Image: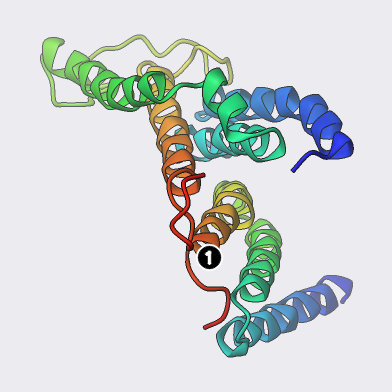
Amino acid sequence: MLVAALDFLLLSFLIVCAIAVARIRDLISAVIIFAAYSLVMAIIWQMLGASDVAITEAALGAGVTTFLFIATISKTKRTE
Amino acid sequence: MEDIVVRAVSRLIVPFIQLYGLYVIFHGHLSPGGGFAGGAIVASSMILYGISFNLEAGSRKLSHDLSSLLESGGALWYLLVGLIGILLGSNFLANKIAGVPLGTPGQLLSSGIIFLLAMGIGAKVASTMVTLFYSLSGGEDSDGNRT
């Protein structure tokens, strides 16, 4: 019961994050929301039993990808 | 950006991230993770060092020449280790079929050539990401100034 509630909470957060990333105009905010999306996605991978994917998602999605996006934005414009 | 808190914390935490990354690489056949995930963790520790100090200090620790050497060396190492299977009279990357001694299950040195392959993959992934980081963060910004 508690696990199902946590699943529901995480998945609804994931959906809200995904819609917000697509809708928001400020690209830095979009990157930060995308990092939060990746972190929650890593937790969900771990809950589904895919620890290997969870480690990769946490290291790449929340860490390296975020920085590469910010480095790209700092060379271009901040708003869409 | 000169922040004493960020510098002190990153100086403290970078060795532990690198140790964890090496653990994930070397225990790829025993626990979740492997060459790619461990290499990404090692690379993220170097990126953390580079953004919390400055880019020059980061490139002094791992120069571009060494990084590209590691990158192509990792791929070459993978190829050479894969050829062991052919040399022992079987297919490319063959492990148990080619008669490589597998050791005891559950031990670190227990998987034949997979352990050696993970080392090559880890070195290649880590150096590729560090190279990507320095290529993106160096150079010109949006106003055309050299940074």
Q: Mark 1 points at which residue?
A: A73
Specify the subunit that label 1 lies on.
A
Q: Which residue is drawn at 12% across and 17% down?
A: B86
Residue B125, image x and y in percent?
Answer: 42, 35
In this rendering, the answer to whether A2 lies above or below B26 is: below
Residue B118, image x and y in percent?
Answer: 42, 26
Residue B105, image x and y in percent?
Answer: 53, 19
In this rendering, the answer to whether B61 lies above or below B43 is: above
| Rendering quarter of residue B32 | top right
Q: Residue at x 85, y 29 (%)?
A: B8
Q: Residue at x 46, y 10 (%)?
A: B103
Q: Which amino acid does label 1 sit on?
A: Ile
Name the colour scheme: rainbow
In this rendering, the answer to whether B100 lies above or below A27 is: above
Q: Is mark 1 on a helix, strand or loop?
A: helix
Quarter of the image with the N terminus of chain B is top right
> Between residues B46 and B93, which one lies in front from this camera angle?
B46
| Rendering quarter of residue B111 | top left
In this rendering, the answer to whether B24 lies above or below B1 is: above
> Between residues B99 and B83, which one lies in front from this camera angle?
B83
The number of numbered badges drawn on the structure is 1
> Between residues A33 and B113, which one lies in front from this camera angle?
A33
| Rendering quarter of residue A41 | bottom right
Query: Label 1: how many residues lie within 10 Å, few (<14), some (14-19) or many (20+)?
Result: some
Residue B48, image x and y in percent?
Answer: 66, 38
Tell me: A49 left or right of B130. Answer: right
